[in-house]
Amino acid sequence: MSLNKKGAVIFSSRYGSTRQYAEWIGQQLQIPVMDVDELYPAALEGFDYLVLGTPVYIGKMLIKGWLHRHLAKLQTKQLMLFVVCGTSSSERQKQEQIVRDNVPEDLIPMENIFFLSGRLTIRELSWKDRLMLKMGARLEKDPQKKAAMLHDIDGVKRENITGVVNSAITMVRSGADSRHVPVG
Ligand SMILES: Cc1cc2nc3c(=O)[nH]c(=O)nc-3n(C[C@H](O)[C@H](O)[C@H](O)COP(=O)(O)O)c2cc1C
């Protein structure tokens, strides 16, 4: 799949599930894949559209700070965002809250934001993350969700990227800006 415009997948990941999705999306769209921590801000200049990817830790997107620091540059691009986490598709209100808390207002419309199932491998976590998870589980009232936070989960599947890829293609072909930019 080769589109006329220049694009890139830019992601952040702690344990690899967001990286995995980023690589699959990059392969499918035939665009480069870059880790935010290895990216020179000047490199953003060369791209017309970006597919951004981030996991969520304690309600916070790993790329939250980066989104705010590079807001002016990002506002000139067509943008998609995929969010990798444990919040399921049935928890729409929670997802919307995560977006409100992390994404600068009006930067990316909701229809360009996709939530993808993440992965949790307890034995791979740092002691700090394991502790955070245990504390979170202690505070969780729903017994099912509490149990889910203390067990491994693997929802990372290649077929999950279909919506992101199709929407990226539609966005780029339509040529529409991802935001409504007021003129004048
Ligand atoms: C300490 C910790 C906190 C987490 N907090 C959240 C959270 O607040 N909301 C959520 O939906 N998922 C949460 N998750 C699940 C991660 O977002 C999920 O495991 C994701 O796949 C990790 O992405 P990565 O492998 O790219 O780092 C948490 C996981 C850990 C280990």
Image (spheres, grey):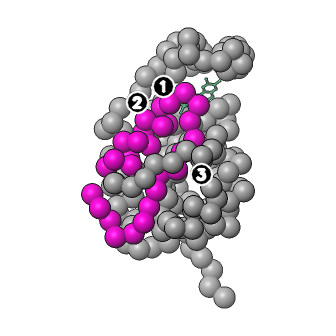
> Eyeballing the image, is 163 above or below 77?
above
Pick out the residue farthest to the bottom.
184
> At 33% from the left edge and 47% from the top edge, which residue is drawn?
27
Dots 2 and 1: beta carbons under 8 Å? yes
What type is the residue that disc 1 sits on?
Arg
Say which residue label 3 marks. 39
Dot 2 beta carbon under 8 Å from ligand 1 = yes
- The residue pinned by badge 2 equals 156
Picture quarter with ligand 1: top right
In primary-sequence order, the first of circles 2 and 1 is: 1
Q: Which residue is mark 1?
A: 119
**Closer mark to the observer between disc 3 and disc 1:** 3
Residue 98 lies in quadrant = top right
Q: What's the distance in space between the residues labelled 3 and 1, CA to CA?
A: 25 Å
Query: Of helix, strand and loop, which one carries label 3?
Result: loop
Give the extent of the magenta segment.
1-29
Residue 163 place in picture, x, y as percent: 36, 49
In the image, residue 41 lies at what x, y percent? Answer: 64, 59
Q: Amino acid at mark 3?
A: Leu
Residue under the image location 50 percent in, 65 percent down? 47
Q: Is residue 55 magenta?
A: no
Q: How many marks?
A: 3
Could you tell me residue 102's position as x and y percent?
67, 48
Q: Is residue 83 left or right of residue 70?
A: left
Describe residue 174's horizontal placement relative to residue 132 as left or right: left
